[in-house]
Each structure stands twice: as structure tokens, then as C-alpha cells.
Amino acid sequence: MLNANGVSNDEFLEYKGRPLVRQGEEIFYGDMSEKFYIYMMIMTEKDTANGSVPDKIMVQLCDTATQRPSNQKIVVGFKEAFEFADAWLERFNK
């Protein structure tokens, strides 16, 4: 079945082979069948010539079983937040 945007509900965007879901200022990154996933919250945005872009992002490593964060870091920049999140998942989901 397709949603309002024409994307199958069974499909997700991916970053480096892991599912990625964004709803407003919240981002969930990672496979829920693994031990850990990442929760991110966009805390601030900055204006650029191309519009507003995320600036400060809270990144939390969360245990899939308990849904509780085990590590947290504030990162500046969207790309940096995803690189940091990917490194955490690589390390803790071994």
C-alpha cells in the first residue's frame, strides 16, 4: 500500500544501508531488530541562502529492548550528526 507521498509503507529512506525515518524535528536511524538504534532531535536551525538547515542536533544511542538512551551527545551540523550516529551503531551493534 502507498502512503500519501506515493511511497510504500514497507520502504524507508536509508543512510549507509540503515533505515531512516524523520517526523518533524525527530529522526530515528537504525534497524529495530538490532540491539541499538539512534534517536536524533533537531534543537536549532540556521538560515542560509538556500533556506533553513538543521544546526545543533541531539544524538542519542538507544537500547532497542528498553527504548532508553545509553549515550547522548550534542553535535553541530546534520552531516556530522549522521557520521557520529553511524559510528555509534557500528561500534555498539557488533
Image (cartoon, grey):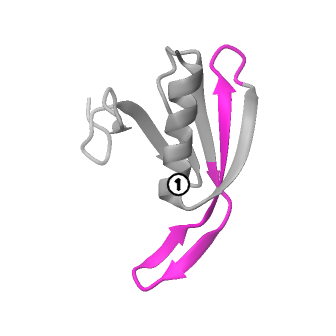
The residue type indicated by label 1 comes to Glu
Q: Quadrant of the N terminus?
A: top left
Mark 1 falls on what kind of element?
Answer: helix
Q: Position of residue 93 (x, y in %)?
A: 54, 18
The answer to whether 44 appears left or right of 2 in the picture is right
Which residue is at the front of the view, 49 or 2? Answer: 49
Q: Which portion, as a residue range, is magenta?
A: 41-67
The answer to if 47 sits in the magenta stretch is yes
Which residue is at the front of the view, 90 or 8? Answer: 90
| Residue pictured at 49% horizontal, 29% vertical | 30
| Residue pictured at 43% horizontal, 38% vertical | 20
Q: Position of residue 75 (x, y in %)?
A: 64, 55
Q: Main secondary structure of the magenta part?
A: strand
Residue 57 versus residue 49 in the image, above or below: above
The answer to whether 78 appears left or right of 71 in the picture is left
Q: Quadrant of residue 64?
A: top right
Q: Position of residue 68 (x, y in %)?
A: 75, 26
Which residue is at the front of the view, 83 or 58? Answer: 83
Q: Which residue is mark 1?
A: 80
Residue 52 versus residue 14 in the image, above or below: below
Q: Quadrant of residue 6?
A: top left
